[in-house]
Amino acid sequence: MKRSGIERSGLTPRFWEKKPLEKLSQKEWEALCDGCGKCCLNKLEDEDTGEVALTRVACRLLDDQTCRCAHYENRHQFIPECIVLKPDNLDTHAYWMPQTCAYRLLWEGKPLPAWHPLETGSPHSVHEAGVSVQGMTVSEFDTPEEDWEDHIIEEPI
Ligand code: SF4
Ligand code: SF4
């Protein structure tokens, strides 16, 4: 769900502490994304236990250097299953979302981390903190699904 470019100018200061998620404007909602790219990594889910394992195998549209989706606006033409996260479906998806994802954190009633771009004013702070997927992925083009188990990783947090 990584945005192609995140506009954070002209926002109400600390809006995420003043309004519930369902009251945010579209611009505020989009600005919450920290740009980590972790939600664009493929996961393996155990059908019996529901346990979710993260892999370093990235969606084919993820740019490993910018951690952005190459075709965010029309991504569903290429990846129809890419989730459109909204306040009313967070309860369905929160369990598999990255621990540091801003949407998950706020949904859980937790604050944003100090490295979040809304806190630092810099879109680079997520990478500088080492919590993004920058430079650590392999492409799903080059990695057959039967090999994904070999690429299970711990979430960088
Ligand atoms: S299409 Fe892929 S890269 Fe783009 S937002 Fe969805 S999961 Fe991320
Ligand atoms: S995990 Fe959350 S904060 Fe990180 S890119 Fe995905 S939607 Fe944005």
Image (cartoon, rainbow, N blue to C red):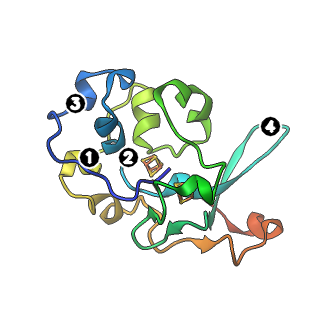
- The x and y percentages for residue 60 are 61, 68
- The x and y percentages for residue 133 are 48, 64
Residue on which the image places disc 1: 114
Q: Relative to the observer, which residue lies in front, 12 or 129? A: 12
The answer to which image quadrant residue 57 occupies is: bottom right
Which of pointers 4 and 2 lies earlier in the amino acid sequence? 2
Q: Is mark 3 within 8 Å of ligand 2?
A: no
Residue drawn at (37%, 25%) of the image:
21
Which structural element holds mark 1?
loop
- Does residue 155 appear in the picture of this structure? no
Q: What is the CA distance from the residue labelled 1 to the residue labelled 3?
A: 16 Å
Q: What is the CA distance from the residue labelled 2 to the residue labelled 1?
A: 14 Å
Which of pointers 1 and 3 lies earlier in the amino acid sequence? 3
Residue on which the image places disc 4: 49
Residue on which the image places disc 3: 15
Q: Residues within 10 Å of mark 1 (few under 14, many from 20)?
A: few
Q: Are marks 1 and 3 in contact (CB under 8 Å)?
A: no
Q: Residues within 10 Å of mark 4 (few under 14, many from 20)?
A: few
Residue drawn at (47%, 35%) of the image:
104
Residue 33, which numbered label? 2
Which of pointers 4 and 1 lies earlier in the amino acid sequence? 4
Three-letter code for the amino acid on which mark 4 is drawn: Thr
Residue drawn at (33%, 60%) of the image:
129
